[in-house]
Amino acid sequence: MGDSQLVHPPLFTYISMLTLLTIVPPFVILMWYTNVHADGSVLQTFNFLKENGLQGLIDIWPRPTAVAGKIIICYALFEAILQLLLPGKRVEGPISPTGHRPVYKANGVAAYIVTLITYLSLWWFGIFNPTIVYDHLGEILSTLNFGSLIFCLFLYIKGHVAPSSTDHGSSGNIIIDYYWGMELYPRIGKHFDIKVFTNCRFGMISWAVLPITYCIKQYEEYGSLSDSMLVHTIITLVYVTKFFWWEAGYWNTMDIAHDRAGFYICWGCLVFLPCIYTSPGMYLVKHPVNLGPQLAISILVAGILCVYINYDCDRQRQEFRRTNGKALVWGRPPSKIVASYTTTTGETKTSLLLTSGWWGLSRHFHYVPEILASFFWCVPALFNHFIPYFYVIYLIVLLLDRAKRDDERCKSKYGKYWKKYCDKVPYRVIPGIY
């Protein structure tokens, strides 16, 4: 059972789960509709739904089509083949509560580069025009929506019938199991890791492919590319590139090492991520903003700097762990707390908690540059509409909730050492404020 439902009271968790299961799938379609057909105006979409009710939603909901299905299947197969076949270093994940240690092949950078080169080549040589993806985006999101709900059902059944490792279990409630997932590390066969596929390959690579698609669409539509679109796309690509560069580190995070493979993570990465995370670019296609060189360069530099700081936070902690607390932090020996804890099997183990460098500022300081970076890749849209900023607001809610869940989990894991750690690093996310 994931610890996630212990942080919030069960009834609240249950209601929020049902709400998310019913509201988020249509929300993805409304996000697309607002950006593409309602001039980016939330009000226009809201008034349309107010007048037409549920029938209005059914009317604007694109039907899944064969073209959309083909695009999704080709992309999914392409990524799956790259994940299986490309060479990569063997990387071990963290030991799970039941003592299982997953092994990965770190070929994310290769898969990412091969995908982008292939995609651009198909366009360059006139084999496939990426604007087709934009033109059929509604159908693609609709098909993905239904397809991923079925895929999560497959994960649920697989967790009951044929779990891949010892890290699985049921809460006894079908909705909670469907939402949070049954298995921590589901695989198909020995080597094909489902979570690496949904989160890193399908999800994260789409976050690079779609902004490029939007650029090509804007270029074909207007004959030129606006500097706002360019700035948005460059910062996004720098962020996604950083993600793959650091992918093995991602396998140690909550998403992989703690959240099970269910609707929350897998549907989220297959549907919510491609639509919501790329929504500022989707908006910019039809709303080209001219920033002028001075503003464009300022936003670009600020955005890239934030991505770098976010990377440096993660790198600092990774180095600290890798060298067993011996690496210098900002040129000085690190200050640390040695914490011991007991695993579910009753073994006692120790962990080092870093309390200097970026990690001395707050317990989850790395979320600050991540939120700021997202602001800088949304801000090229300027302030005519609210919708490009939805992602920033969503990210703030997501990360603050994650910081809270992570803190609760560490509190129960480390006990008195965690209290000592919190005395030393009192702020959760924003130094001096929160």
Image (cartoon, grey):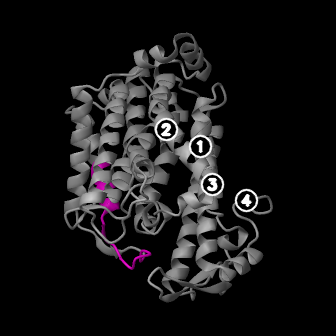
User: Which label lies toward us, 4 or 3?
Assistant: 3
Residue linked to disc 2: 276
Report how far apart the C-alphas of labels 4 and 3 lie in the structure. 26 Å
Position of 137 compared to 4: left or right?
left
**In the image: residue 184, left or right of residue 230:** left
Q: Is residue 89 above or below residue 76?
A: below
Give, as a three-letter code, the residue at label 4. Answer: Ile
The residue where tag 4 is placed is 430
> Which of the two marks, 1 or 4, is nearer to us in this view?
1
| Image quadrant assignment for residue 168 | bottom left
Q: Is residue 57 above or below residue 125?
A: above
**What's the CA distance linking mark 3 and mark 2?**
28 Å
Pointer 4 or 2: first along the chain: 2
Q: Secondary structure at mark 1?
A: helix
Q: Report how many numbered discs are placed on residues in the image.
A: 4
Q: Earlier in the sequence, mark 1 or mark 3?
A: 3
Residue found farthest to the top: 51
Q: Which residue is mark 1?
A: 394
In this view, the mark in front (3 or 2): 3
Residue displayed at 62% across by 33% down:
292
Q: Are marks 1 and 2 in contact (CB under 8 Å)?
A: yes
